[in-house]
Amino acid sequence: MLADYAVRVEQSRGRRVPEPQHPYRDDFQRDRDRVIHSRAFRRLEAKTQVFTRRFSDHFRNRLTHTIEVAQIARTIAFQLGLNVDLVEALALVHDVGHPPFGHAGEKALDAVMREHGLLFDHNLHALRIVEDFEMRYAAFRGLNLTFEVREGIIKHSHDYSASQFPELAEYLLDHRPPLEAQLIDLADEIAYDTADLDDGYEARLLTLPQIRGGVPVFDRFYCEAEQTYPNAIEKLKFNEALKRVLDRMVGDLIRNLQSQINDARIRNLKDVRACPHRLATFSPEVEEERRSTKEFLYRNLYFSAALDSEKNDAERVIRQLFEFWMAKPESLPQTYWQKAAQEPLPRVVCDYIAGMTDNFIYEQHGKYCGRID
Ligand code: MG
């Protein structure tokens, strides 16, 4: 069933701590299941994607976004003969390193870390979660995931240089990641570009004429939906158009990746790794649609004044809590306080904050820093 260029589980580089085989689940299936049963995965439910619950219970949170990415990534992987179990594990784990408050939280945490000459990166944090912070098994710390899942956590969205990140040298930084990891970043973008149009429209931060005027591919499909369903209500025509945008991106990625594989004469995983560029890309036409849709979302939604107060809250809560624990590290939970003996205090505080849900960080802020007006 698997294509010659797919990752084969029997050729996995294995786990840090060797374990006996499971009687009927292979190693990538087990990794997927370990992610699903982790605490970091459950916390995604209470982390902001773009909108907090204050707007509506129907908006995506990081967990439902993750499930959508897994659905899209599985579809693409199956069509191309890639390893669907590995893809599913990578999709389900891809956002576990995100701090509370979505991108505003990530920016705020990175900014306070840079004041101490350090940085915050959600992929690196995800690796720390699965390698160390999850405490579930008696035989080892972390989830003891296979090399291929850990490599995909680091390499799915961009390349890291070995000179800047010597601690990542084992992840073959001068090689491309397998196609299973490469497609996660694009499945992620297909999921959030379409979902953010949907949630933005539902939140009334984006209007239909605005979307039709700013996203030409959506407008084309909306005209089609109007012709096919002239009597349907606006929201259903909206849904029909958005569904077609998503389907167009997925179909294009499958076709374009297949032709990239053929053009580059990729025969096996070694060829994928040695290829000088990533093979998972959209066609130039759809790439242009993706780029302009994203630009539209930045201009009209992510940077919209309506989200400013949430972003300011996020920045203030994170900064004040960070500064509080830097000044009073003895108020950290015992396990984190102990870690400060081996690691720089800003990193320990950052790790603690990054793991929090939106609810929990507000609670902590109320307890240590007083109320937000
Ligand atoms: Mg994501």
Image (tube, helix red, strand yellow):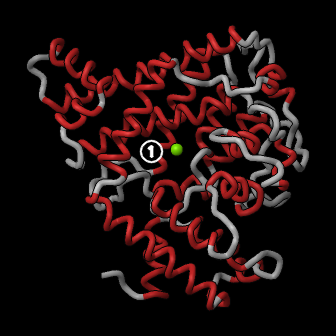
The residue at the point 50 percent across, 28 percent down is 72
> Is residue 292 rendered to the left or right of residue 78?
left
Quadrant where the C terminus sits is bottom left
Can you give x and y, in whole percent of width and height, for residue 112 in the image? 58, 73
Residue 40 in percent (x, y) is at 60, 57
Residue at which label 1 appears: 64
Crowding near pointer 1: few (<14 within 10 Å), some, many (20+)? some
> Is label 1's Cβ within 8 Å of ligand 1?
no
Looking at the picture, tell me which residue is in the foreground, 39 or 322: 322
342 lies above or below 177: below
- Where residue 8 sits, quadrant-wise, is top right
> Relative to 263, is 225 above or below?
below
Q: Nearer the viewer, residue 105 or 337?
A: 105
Percent x, y for residue 263?
A: 69, 9
Image height of 252 relative to 115, above or below: above
Tag 1: amino acid: Thr
Looking at this rendering, what residue extends furthest in the left direction? 231
Question: What residue is shown at x 87% (from left), y 45% (from top)?
Answer: 170
Residue at 56 percent of width and 21 percent of height: 76
- The residue shown at (69%, 44%) is 153
Circle 1 sits in a helix, a strand or a loop, which is it? Answer: helix
Residue 187 is left or right of residue 172, and the answer is left
Please tell me which residue lies in front, 185 or 145.
Answer: 185
152, 86: nearer the viewer:
152
- Which quadrant would the N terminus be assigned to in this image? top right
The image quadrant that residue 355 belongs to is bottom right
Total number of numbered discs in the rendering: 1
Where's residue 66, x and y in %?
51, 43
Q: Which quarter of the picture shows residue 210?
A: top left
Left or right for 45, reference 170? left
